[in-house]
Each structure stands twice: as structure tokens, then as C-alpha cells.
């Protein structure tokens, strides 16, 4: 029994080229998980504005990190186990049975677990305060001095990684138990059959990616409730297609190059292409994993940074006044109806009681109409409940006297004239407006946007007419707004909101169907805090996950270089013996490794470019129209990531060159 710990410690020490990077990366994951768990229960984070939202995001991130750790550590441990197959086979031949081998591996796993946990916990404790300061800076919270250690985070990390390392141990025992000792001992000397180009799987991979790309690029922003679902449906084909592309498609490409005799029978390409075919057959899954991880990093960082940088512009658009109270009468068959004039009267009466400055109040009626170029047919849809289709537009109508009251102007309109303003991304370009082939209005466009909730739709317009009463029969609802400046406390907002709600429903009679009245009250500061909390939390999570994914990518590159270096050592010895110069061999190695490890980044950038279309659609729904900002952010993030990737590729490639004797 005492022999097991010694053999385990000696195995880790003699295979430090494999175990030390694994322990270091596991420690990094534990450190990140500790930071996430500690901040999710931090009183400082909880006390800042939007703290509960931040803590919710952090809670979700714990599950993401734990799931990632399980998959990644299983995957990387397979490299370690495969390299140790010969050693374990020798132990078996020398008299150790499978039970003895399991005992040795149990102590190896225990040593790795304890080492990783201690190093990771120290790392997490040391950097937790720095991470907290960065998070509070993003969330515009107040940072406090003081150093604490989270017992909850330490316990959570210990339990999660105890489970992960135990599962790794069970998997290792399973592999060894079903392996033949003689084959284990000779595993590195076994021949490998030439890879076959599977045209069907290669084409299937390309088809899956094209299908996913088409699904994303054909998304209709008008169907916003299905936007996330459609994107989620495209994720699986992209992942599956990427794996098939690297495993089968890359071999197929090599076979095509081999048929080009002029290209293939060249000393610069012959060894590289033939060896790449074998390598892609073995390494396709690993390279596909690198590509998927890279795609996740690029999308997460690009989108969250672009979203966070536009919060201020959204607040300016949404809140022309600091305090906003909104009541929406939704018209259903069983609901009590109200006229626009009555709604406006109630609204102005309530606004007169507001204790603030720059008080603005008005009521508008809403309906959905389908059409273009000035010709529209009212559909009867309810913009907040029914799905919108291509050509659907949301129109909000207010009478001229309300417009003049709000703006302080004395505008006059003829009965066949209308003022129209776009409150969403698309402008109104026709010089007339007609609903249901009835009266035609000459239109004049102005810039007029007062929190009309229109930014949630691609086509939304505010229309001013002398008299809008003839359109009340088509209205899907009437919305009342009361807005003013002033620093209201939470209690003042609650009291005024309660009074406003009661006044808007003031003439309800017992026994009658009530008004379908939706009500909300908020402030610019509250909304900005909520936005900042969500996106700062997402950025923080993005940075943490980027560190993990980048570390995982680097470790996968390193293990591939080590694993393939040992496999290719004999091949390059033969090449030297038959007269190939070291310079030619180095040129072949550089060409081979560069193409192999650059391909995941190129595929990831292609995936990210398509995904940015979805991100742009989602931004528009949130009222963010910084398309150029999103493109610039995505480009900068991709360039920086590629440079970092290339630097670590060069560092890890030295390991390969050293192993093969260059």
C-alpha cells in the first residue's frame, strides 16, 4: 500500500511535461471559480446598485465554469492518459494487476487534486479583491478596502473539483481495465492505416455549417420573440459541422492536394501534406474544440463590450426626462375601453400633481399596419402581444394639441396634413400616408421621440394629426406617459406610482369588466443601473471565461505539440537518414504546424462574423444602433486574440521542434 504513493509521485515527477501543465490549468480554473463564487456572495457587490442582478449573473457563471471544467479536464486528461499507456502496460507486464494500477492512479489523482486545489485557492484569494474592484468599476459601484476569504467559495470549489477528479479517476480505471497489456506496451509502435477521405461526412460538415449560416443570416428582426430560439437552433449544426469539417473535411482536402502531382511531389509539400492527412485524422476533434472555444471567446467579448459602450446612448433615447410613469390600456374583447381624450385628460390631471420640473404628459393610441411607401393596411394585431411579420409597422397617433403642448410650439395643420417621426432604426421616406385606402395625408417628417417604446420594433412611427379619433376603432391600446425631472426617492416613486395607477383606473364600477391596464414606473438612474449591472456582469463573466478558454486553447495546443512530437520523432529521424537536410525538415515542420493550428482561428473568425449579424439584430431590439461600433469591436477583439494565439502557438511549437530533434 505504501508503494502506491511513491509510484504515483514518481510518475507525476517523471511525466512532469504532461502533469505540471494539467495541474497549472486546473489550478487556474479553481481560482476563477473561487472568484466567481466569492463575488456571488460578496456584501460589497450586493450593496451596490443593481447588486442583485450582478449576483444572479455570477451565480449562472459558476455553473458555466463548472461545466466547462468537467468537459475540458476530461478532454485534456485523455492526452495525459494516452501518453502514459506504455508505462502502465509495463507495470502490468512486470506483475501489477489492474487493481494495483487503479491504486497507483488513485494516488496520482489525489496528488493532482490536492495540488490543484491549494494552488488554485491561493490564486483565487490573492486576485479576488482585484477582480471585485474591476467588477465594481464596470458596475459603477463603490469599492471598499479590506481583505476577506470566502469560506463558501473554498467549500464549493473543494466539492465541485473533488467530484470532477473522482470522475476522471473512474474514467482512467475504465480505460486501463479494458486495455490489453501487450497492446498498451506497444501502443506507440503500432502502425496506422492510411486515412480515408470520407466524402459524405466532409460534405455533411460543410452542409451543416452552410445551413446554420443561412439560418442566422435569414433571421427577421420582426420575429424578435423567436430570435434567440433560432440562433440556438443554429448552434448545434455549427458545432457538429465544425467537428466534421476538421475530422473528415480536412482529410478530404489533403487527398485532393495529393492528386495534384505538381504540387504534391515537391519537397516543401510532400511530407507536410501526407503527414497532415494523418494528423487531421487524429487531431481533428482537438482542433475543432479549439475552434469552438475561440468562437465563444470572440462572440462573448465583442458583443458584451459593444453593448456596454452603448448604455448611455440608450438611456438618452429612452429617458428624455429622469422619471417616467407609463400606463397602457390594452384592448381585449372582454376589457373595458377608454377614449383617447379621456386618457389624455386623466394623464394631464395626474401630471399637474407631479413635484418636479420639465413635466411632460400625453396619451397616444397604437395600432399595427402592414405596408410600405406610404400605403398601409391596419392589421388588428396588438404590438405587445402578437408576432409581427415583414412589412408590419407600429403606428402611434397623437392629436395636434397634445403635440403643441409637449413641444411648446403653435404648429398648425390642414385636415389632410400630418407630422410623422420615426422612433426606431428605419426612417419614414414617403411624402404621404394612407391607411386602408382611405384618406391621404401629406406628411412632414420631424425628429420627435419621447419615450414611445417604439425602439423595440424595426419600423415604428409617431404620427401627429389634427384629429385622430377616427382611428380609435382600430387601436390595439392607448398608452399614457407622465415624465418629469427631479430626484425622487424610492418611496416617493412608489407613492406617486400608486396614486397614478389608481387615478388611471378611477372610474371602474363593481361588476364591470376592468380596464386591461399595464403600469410601470422607473427612473433613468434605475434603468441605467440595471443595464450597467447586467452588461458589466456579462463583461466580467466574458473576461473570466476568456481567460479560461484561452488557457484551455493554449493547453490543447501544448498537448498536441507534445503528443505529435513524440509520434513524429521516428519519422523525422528516417527523413534525416535518407538525406533530407535539417533546414528542409524545419521548413516542413513549420508549414505543417502553422497550417494545423492556424485553421481553428480562421474557422472561428468565420463563425464569429456570421454570429455578429445575430448580435446586431439583438442590439437593434434593445435600441442600440451602433453597427460600426460592433464591427470595430469585433475586428479589434479578433485581431488581439489572433496575435495572442500566434504568440502562444510559437511558444508551444518550440516544444514540438525540441522533441523531434530540431
Image (cartoon, rainbow, N blue to C red):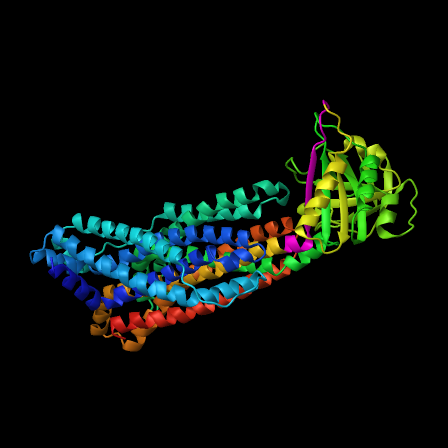
Residue 659: % across, % down:
25, 71
Q: Is residue 97 left or right of residue 370?
A: left
Which sits in the foreground, 514 or 305?
514
Report whether residue 638 is seen.
no
Left or right: 184 in relation to 614: left
Taking the spot 34% from the left edge, 48% from the top edge, the residue there is 198
User: In the drawing, does residue 62 fall left or right of residue 188?
Assistant: right
**Highlighted range, magenta:** 511-528
Q: Nearer the viewer, residue 379 or 168?
A: 168
Residue at image coords 50%, 57%: 43
Quadrant location of the N terminus? bottom left
Relative to 182, is 201 on the left or the right?
A: right
- Is residue 522 found inside the magenta-colored segment of the image? yes
Which image quadrant for residue 598? bottom left
Q: Nearer the viewer, residue 11 or 231?
A: 11
Image quadrant containing the C terminus:
bottom left
Q: Is 483 rendered above or below residue 470?
A: below
**Foreground pick, 125 / 108:** 125
Residue at the farthest top position: 511
The correct choice, above or below, for 19 with respect to 383 in the image is: below
**From where the camera sits, is residue 526 visible?**
yes
Count of labels shown? 0
The residue sitting at 33% across, 51% down in the picture is 197
Write down the quadrant of residue 279 in the picture.
Answer: bottom left
Image coordinates of residue 8 in percent, x first then y, are 18, 62
Is residue 127 within the magenta segment?
no
Q: Position of residue 94 (x, y in %)?
A: 7, 58
* Residue 392 position within the rendered picture, expressed as x and y whole percent measured from the top left: 70, 39
Residue at 56 percent of width and 48 percent of height: 217
Amino acid at each position: 500500500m505504501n508503494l502506491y504513493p511513491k509510484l504515483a509521485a514518481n510518475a507525476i515527477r517523471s511525466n512532469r511535461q504532461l502533469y505540471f501543465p494539467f495541474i497549472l490549468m486546473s489550478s487556474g480554473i479553481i481560482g476563477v471559480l473561487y472568484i466567481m463564487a466569492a463575488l456571488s456572495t460578496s456584501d460589497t457587490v450586493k450593496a451596490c446598485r443593481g447588486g442583485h442582478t450582478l449576483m444572479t449573473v455570477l451565480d449562472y457563471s459558476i455553473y458555466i465554469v463548472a461545466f466547462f471544467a468537467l468537459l475540458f479536464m476530461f478532454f485534456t486528461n485523455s492526452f495525459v492518459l494516452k501518453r502514459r499507456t506504455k508505462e502502465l502496460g509495463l507495470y502490468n507486464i512486470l506483475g501489477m494487476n489492474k487493481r494495483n494500477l487503479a491504486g497507483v492512479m488513485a494516488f496520482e489523482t489525489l496528488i493532482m487534486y490536492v495540488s490543484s486545489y491549494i494552488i488554485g485557492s491561493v490564486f483565487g484569494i490573492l486576485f479576488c479583491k482585484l477582480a471585485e474592484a474591476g467588477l465594481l468599476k464596470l458596475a459603477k459601484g463603490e469599492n471598499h478596502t479590506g481583505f476577506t476569504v470566502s469560506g463558501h467559495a473554498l467549500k464549493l470549489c473543494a466539492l465541485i473539483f473533488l467530484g470532477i477528479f473522482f470522475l476522471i479517476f473512474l474514467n482512467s480505471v475504465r480505460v486501463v481495465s479494458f486495455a490489453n497489456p501487450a497492446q498498451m506496451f506497444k501502443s506507440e509502435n503500432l502502425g496506422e492505416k492510411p486515412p480515408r477521405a470520407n466524402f459524405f461526412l466532409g460534405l455533411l460538415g460543410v452542409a451543416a455549417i452552410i445551413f446554420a449560416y443561412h439560418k442566422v443570416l435569414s433571421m427577421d428582426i420582426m420575429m424578435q420573440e423567436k430570435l434567440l430560439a433560432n440562433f440556438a437552433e443554429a448552434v448545434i449544426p455549427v458545432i457538429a459541422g465544425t467537428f466534421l469539417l476538421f475530422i473528415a473535411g480536412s482529410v478530404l482536402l489533403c487527398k485532393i492536394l495529393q492528386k495534384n502531382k505538381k504540387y504534391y511531389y515537391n519537397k516543401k509539400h510532400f511530407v507536410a501534406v501526407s503527414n497532415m492527412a494523418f494528423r487531421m485524422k487524429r487531431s481533428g476533434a482537438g482542433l475543432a474544440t479549439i475552434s469552438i472555444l475561440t468562437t465563444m471567446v470572440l462572440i462573448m467579448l465583442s458583443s458584451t463590450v459593444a453593448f456596454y459602450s452603448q448604455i448611455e446612448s440608450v438611456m438618452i433615447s429612452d429617458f428624455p426626462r429622469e422619471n417616467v410613469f407609463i400606463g397602457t390600456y390594452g384592448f381585449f374583447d372582454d376589457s373595458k375601453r377608454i377614449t383617447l381624450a379621456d386618457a389624455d385628460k386623466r394623464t394631464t390631471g395626474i401630471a399637474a400633481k407631479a413635484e418636479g420640473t420639465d413635466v411632460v404628459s400625453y396619451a397616444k393610441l397604437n395600432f399595427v399596419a402592414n405596408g410600405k411607401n406610404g400605403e398601409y393596411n391596419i392589421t388588428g394585431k396588438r404590438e405587445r402581444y402578437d408576432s409581427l411579420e415583414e412589412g408590419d409597422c407600429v403606428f402611434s397617433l397623437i392629436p395636434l394639441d397634445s403635440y403643441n403642448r409637449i413641444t411648446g410650439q403653435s404648429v398648425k395643420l390642414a385636415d389632410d396634413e400630418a407630422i410623422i417621426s420615426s422612433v426606431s432604426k428605419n426612417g419614414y421616406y414617403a411624402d404621404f400616408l394612407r391607411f386602408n385606402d382611405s384618406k391621404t395625408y401629406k406628411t412632414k417628417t420631424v425628429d420627435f421621440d419621447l419615450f414611445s417604446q417604439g425602439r423595440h420594433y424595426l419600423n415604428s412611427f409617431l404620427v401627429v394629426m389634427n384629429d385622430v379619433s377616427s382611428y380609435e376603432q382600430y387601436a390595439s391600446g392607448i398608452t399614457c406617459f407622465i415624465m418629469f425631472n427631479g430626484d425622487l426617492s424610492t418611496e416617493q416613486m412608489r407613492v406617486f406610482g400608486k396614486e397614478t395607477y389608481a387615478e388611471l383606473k378611477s372610474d371602474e364600477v363593481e361588476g364591470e369588466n376592468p380596464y386591461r391596464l399595464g403600469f410601470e414606473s422607473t427612473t433613468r438612474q434605475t434603468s441605467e443601473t440595471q443595464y450597467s449591472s447586467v452588461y458589466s456582469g456579462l463583461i466580467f463573466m466574458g473576461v473570466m471565461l476568456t481567460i479560461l478558454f484561452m488557457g484551455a486553447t493554449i493547453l490543447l495546443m501544448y498537448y498536441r505539440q507534445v503528443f505529435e512530437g513524440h509520434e513524429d520523432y521516428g519519422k523525422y529521424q528516417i527523413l534525416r537518414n535518407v538525406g533530407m537536410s535539417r533546414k528542409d525538415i524545419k521548413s516542413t515542420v513549420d508549414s505543417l504546424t502553422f497550417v494545423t493550428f492556424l485553421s481553428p482561428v480562421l474557422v472561428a473568425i468565420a463563425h464569429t462574423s456570421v454570429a455578429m449579424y445575430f448580435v446586431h439584430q439583438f442590439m437593434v431590439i434593445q435600441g442600440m444602433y451602433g453597427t460600426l461600433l460592433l464591427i470595430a469591436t469585433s475586428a479589434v477583439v479578433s485581431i488581439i486574440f489572433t496575435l495572442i494565439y500566434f504568440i502562444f502557438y510559437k511558444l508551444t511549437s518550440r516544444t514540438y521542434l525540441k522533441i523531434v530533434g530540431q
